[in-house]
Structure formats: C-alpha cells, structure tokens
C-alpha cells in the first residue's frame, strides 16, 4: 500500500506539471483517489499520447501501471476510455472550482473525474454526474456510492435539468451551446463544452475545440481553450450548426472569439459563428 501511495503522489505531480494545474485541491485529489476503483480489475489496456490508436496491455494487475498520463480502456471494443489525465485535469482546473460549489459533469463515464471534482468542492459542494450509457452509469453509481455529495444520473444531459450550477462540464461533443446549459449557469458560473463537427471517416468521433463560457451580470464571456476529439452528446447535434463549426474551424476563427451572444441580432463583422439563438462573437461582452 505504501508503494501505491508513492505512485499516486508521483502521478499527481506529473499531471500538475503537464497540465500546469493551479488548484492544490485538484492535485490532492489526484494523489488521494484510487483510479483503479473506477477502471475494473487489471491487467488494463492503455493508450499513450504518442500513439492513440493502438492499445497496449499492462504487464500485470498492479495499479501502479495506471498512475501515469495514459488513457485506460473501459470498453476497448467501442474505444471507450477513461480520459487522458493531463487533458481532463487541465479542463477541470479552468472551471476554477471552489469549496462548496455545485458542479454538473455530463459524460461522467464510470465516475473517476466526478470523484476528482467532488474532492475539490468538498462535502459542502455538490456534483451531479450524468451518463448517457446505461452500463457506464450503473458502474458510476456503484463506484461513487460512498460520496454523499455526488448524485449519479443515468440520462441525457441535453434534456436533464440539474438546476442552477456554479460550473458545468460537458464531456461530450456538441455542435452548439444548449439553452438549458446556459440558463442553468449561476452569475459568474462557468461552462466548458466541446464545440465539434463530424469527420465522416472518423465517426462517431467528433473534432473541434473545447470552449469556455462564463456568465456575467450582463452577457457571457467566451473563448476557445484547446483542440479536442470526443464522442458526441447526441441531443446536442444539429446538421446546420455542424456546418458552421466546420467552416469556422477551417478558417481558424475560434481564436478570435471573445463573447457569446444570445440576443436577436443581424449577423455582422463581429459574428464569428452566428447560429440560431446563439452567436460566438469577436467583440467583448457589453
């Protein structure tokens, strides 16, 4: 057990460096939470960032093998994995979670990163973990059962109303921000979601950028964080919006986004992506 605790601390420091983590509570979560609990029994199949197409098997069932910056297969036949820690934790860090915050985690898988966020917000906080896949949701409920601040929902994050939240992390690809997500942000609330389009040859995977949106007293700040490849959020896919995302990605226009507008207006030169009921704009919020 002592050797495993050392592996976890080294893992936490590795992810701190690779993801430039600011939150000490997030680093502590990585050192304390048993990742193997959420992965099923070993040996495990893993993917390394240098080769995300070919699984390799761990030599044995020693959990030390999965305390590394690697993806771990949940269902390799569907290419379903527990995500890359440096990427997921970098995104979680950008949510700027505080003790007592209420958080929504959509696409929670078996719950590992929901547990990480629960550690950050503490017992006075709340994490609503939503998973569309029933089998994964059942595993998440079992894995997270001891965490009283976590509720696991087997359902569709595009329609399940969680109520107001300080932070919403959508871990599945969408073509547009849903009104439900934006409406449920408290003032100062943060939304992270992958704005993506489908590459036919790579379906069902979707590719695009992770977007960050923050609700202000009036309006919303918005910016693009990093590239992302991810499975779809099925209720948040629209063909027309998909074409708009594809066009802006081809033009490299997401780097210019500064705000999200929801007011009715005629598209002008400040509209980077002008959709139905939303607009990612190059102008700053009012």
Image (cartoon, helix red, strand yellow):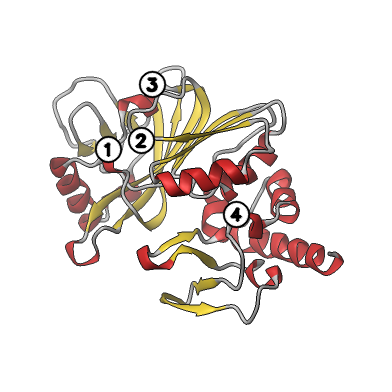
- Going from N to C along the chain, the mark reached first, 2 or 3, is 2
Q: Nearer the viewer, mark 2 or mark 3?
A: 2
Q: Mark 2 and mark 4 in contact (Cβ < 8 Å)?
A: no
Residues tagged 3 and 4 counted as in contact (Cβ below 8 A): no
Q: Tell me if label 4 and label 1 are in contact, CB under 8 Å.
A: no
Say which element carries label 3.
helix
Q: CA distance from mark 2 to mark 1?
A: 7 Å
The residue wearing badge 3 is: 183
Question: Is 52 left or right of 201, judged from the image as shown?
Answer: right
Quadrant in the rendering for residue 175: top left
Whichever of labels 4 and 2 marks the residue nearer the N terminus, that label is 4
Q: CA distance from mark 2 to mark 3?
A: 17 Å
Q: Is residue 237 left or right of residue 5?
A: left
Q: Which residue is mark 4?
A: 38
Q: Which residue is mark 1?
A: 235
- Name which of mark 3 and mark 4 comes first in the sequence: 4
Question: Neighbour class for label 1 at 10 Å: few (<14), some, many (≥20)?
Answer: some
Residue 283, position as x, y percentages in the image? 32, 33
Distance of mark 4 from mark 2, alpha carbons?
21 Å
Sequence-earlier tag: 4 or 1? 4
Q: Would residue 81 be found to the left or right of residue 255 on screen?
A: right
Pointer 2 or 1: first along the chain? 2
Mark 1 residue element = helix
Between circles 3 and 4, the one closer to the viewer is 4
Determine the CA span between mark 3 and mark 4: 32 Å
Looking at the image, which residue is at 40% across and 23% down?
161
**Measured from the top left, where is residue 281 in percent x and y?**
28, 36
- Where does label 2 land, which residue? 156
Q: Which structural element holds mark 2?
A: loop
């Amino acid at each position: 057990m002592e050797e495993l605790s050392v592996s976890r601390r080294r893992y936490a420091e590795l992810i701190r460096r690779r993801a430039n983590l600011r939150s000490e509570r997030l680093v502590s979560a990585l050192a304390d939470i048993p990742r193997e609990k959420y992965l099923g029994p070993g040996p495990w199949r893993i993917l390394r960032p240098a080769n995300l197409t070919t699984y390799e098997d761990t030599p044995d069932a020693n959990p030390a093998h999965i305390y590394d910056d690697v993806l771990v297969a949940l269902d390799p036949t569907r290419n379903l994995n527990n995500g890359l820690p440096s990427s997921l934790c970098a995104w979680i860090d950008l949510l700027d979670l505080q003790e007592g915050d209420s958080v929504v985690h959509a696409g929670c898988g078996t719950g590992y990163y929901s547990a990480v966020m629960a550690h950050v917000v503490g017992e006075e906080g709340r994490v609503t973990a939503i998973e569309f896949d029933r089998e994964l949701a059942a595993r998440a409920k079992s894995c997270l059962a001891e965490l009283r601040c976590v509720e696991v929902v087997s359902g569709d994050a595009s329609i399940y109303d969680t109520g107001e939240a300080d932070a919403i992390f959508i871990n599945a690809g969408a073509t547009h921000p849903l009104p439900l997500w934006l409406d449920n942000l408290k003032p100062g609330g943060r939304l992270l979601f992958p704005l993506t389009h489908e590459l036919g040859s790579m379906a069902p995977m979707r590719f695009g950028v992770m977007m960050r949106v923050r609700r202000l007293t009036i309006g919303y700040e918005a910016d693009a964080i990093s590239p992302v490849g991810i499975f779809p959020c099925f209720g948040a896919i629209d063909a027309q919006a998909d074409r708009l995302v594809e066009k802006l990605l081809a033009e490299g226009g997401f780097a210019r986004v500064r705000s999200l507008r929801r007011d009715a207006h005629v598209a002008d030169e400040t509209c980077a992506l002008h959709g139905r009921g939303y607009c990612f704009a190059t102008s700053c919020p009012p």
